[in-house]
Image (cartoon, rainbow, N blue to C red):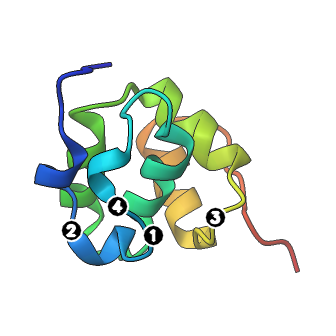
Amino acid sequence: MKTEVNIANSAPKQVFWDMDVSQLSIKKDKALIIPRLLLATTKETFENDIKRVETTYSTHEIYTILKNTKERISNNVCRMVAERYNKPTFLRYKF
């Protein structure tokens, strides 16, 4: 993981609308940052969105954090991440 990255310079402002982005730590706040960066991802934007996250975090970190997050990540995002990393599919919401 790259610790010199400033999330305030690379993340869309609307993703962290409820907090001061400059106070986030790439290392300490990864459980919040990773899901938020993928929150609004669609099939069309997934490739660009996931690449942005992968510049800072490992595939293991991304997969594990999304699998365990309480953030409102869609099942479609969960499926796309699992498929990208050739891992078992997981769902955030089960009906």
Q: Earlier in the sequence, mark 4 or mark 3?
A: 4
**What's the CA distance linking mark 1 and mark 3?**
8 Å
Three-letter residue code for mark 1 = Leu
Q: Which mark is residue 56?
A: none
Badge 2 crowding class, 10 Å Cα cut-off, few under 14, some 14 to 19, many 20 or more, is few
Location of mark 1 (residue): 39
Q: Quadrant of residue 57?
A: top left
Residue drawn at 58 percent across, 68 percent down: 73
Few, some or many C-alpha atoms within 10 Å of disc 3 (few <14, some 14-19, many ≥20)?
Answer: some
Residue, far left: 9
For marks 1 and 3 on the same chain, the one whose residue lies earlier in the sequence: 1
- Left or right: where does residue 15 sit relative to residue 32? left
Separation (CA) of disc 3 from disc 2: 17 Å
Q: What residue is drawn where x is 27% and y is 31%?
A: 56
User: Between marks 1 and 4, how big is the CA–CA gap?
Assistant: 18 Å
Choose mark 1 or mark 4, whichever is in front.
4
Q: Sequence order check: which comes first, mark 4 or mark 2? A: 2
- Disc 4: which residue: 20
Question: Mark 2 or mark 3, which is nearer the start of the sequence?
Answer: 2
Say if mark 1 contacts mark 2, CB within 8 Å: no
The image position of residue 39, as x and y in percent, is: 45, 70
The label shown at residue 71 is 3
Mark 1 vs mark 2: which is more N-terminal?
Answer: 2
Dots 1, 3 in contact, CB < 8 A: yes
Residue 15, given in percent of the width and then of the height, sits at 35, 71
